[in-house]
Image (tube, grey):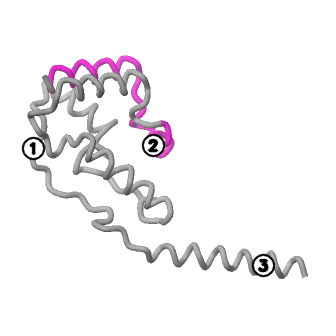
């Protein structure tokens, strides 16, 4: 009797897993057009930002396979939309405050960006200490 109960629980979990794939996300996994970018100080700064920041902070997100599988897709979508709202290199507003620009340096230097949850599936986003410093200097030069 216990094996039957476990089997039914497993069948129920699989069925729920399949059904949640049908829950739509608004604008799911699409990228709006690039409107404008900051005046990058060098191609190297843009390349570092693209490597470590663009998936969540631009309209050039690369949507990997897991971004289509619920419930992970919900987390990826939510994180990306939140990142774009906070800072979007593809919809650059030249009136950004100096405080926001300072915050960028702090979160990169402090290791909070890119976030640890992002790095296992995006190892190329892991920056060395030297690359972090180049990115921070480049962003400070580009965004001031």
- Provide the secondary structure element on which disc 3 rests: helix
Dot 1: what SS?
A: loop
Mark 1 Cα within 10 Å, few/some/many (few <14, many 20+)?
A: few
**Residue occupying the point 28% across, 21% down:** 136
Tell me which secondary structure the magenta stretch mostly adopts. Answer: helix
Q: In this view, does 62 lie to the left or right of 128?
A: left
Q: Is residue 110 magenta?
A: no
**Disc 3 crowd, CA 10 A, few/some/many (<14, 14-19, 20+):** few
Q: Nearer the viewer, residue 75 or 133?
A: 75
The magenta stretch spans residue 125 = yes
Q: Which of marks 3 and 2 is nearer the N terminus?
A: 3
Q: Are marks 1 and 2 in contact (CB under 8 Å)?
A: no
At x 12%, y 34%, the residue is: 38
Residue identified by numbered label 2: 118
Disc 1 and disc 3: Cα gap in Å?
Answer: 54 Å
Residue denoted by label 3: 7
Question: In the image, is residue 82 above or below residue 49?
Answer: below
Q: Give the range drawn in magenta.
A: 116-142
Locate residue 7 relative to residue 74 in the image: left or right: right
Q: What is the x, y in percent for residue 96?
A: 15, 32
Mark 1 → mark 2, Cα distance in angstroms: 25 Å
Residue at horizontal 26 percent and vertical 22 percent from the top? 102
Residue position marked by numbered label 1 in the rendering: 36
Cα distance between the residues tagged 3 and 2: 34 Å
65 versus 107 height, above or below: below
* Residue 101 x %, y %: 22, 26
* Residue at point 35%, 56% (across, down): 63
Looking at the rendered structure, the secondary structure element under dot 2 is loop
In the displayed structure, 53 sits above or below 43; it is: below
N-term-proximal mark, 1 vs 3: 3
């Amino acid at each position: 009797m216990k094996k039957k109960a476990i089997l039914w629980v497993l069948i129920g979990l699989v069925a729920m897993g399949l059904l949640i794939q049908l829950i739509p996300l608004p604008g799911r996994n699409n990228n709006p057009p690039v409107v404008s970018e900051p005046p990058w100080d060098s191609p190297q700064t843009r390349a570092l930002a693209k490597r470590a920041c663009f998936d969540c902070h631009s309209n050039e997100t690369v949507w990997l396979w897991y971004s289509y599988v619920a419930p992970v897709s919900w987390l990826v979508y939510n994180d990306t939309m939140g990142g774009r709202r906070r800072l979007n290199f593809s919809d650059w507003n030249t009136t950004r405050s100096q405080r926001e620009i300072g915050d960028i340096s702090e979160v990169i230097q402090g290791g909070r960006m890119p976030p640890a949850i992002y790095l296992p599936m995006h190892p190329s986003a892991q920056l060395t200490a030297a690359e972090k410093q180049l990115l921070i200097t480049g962003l400070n030069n580009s965004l001031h």
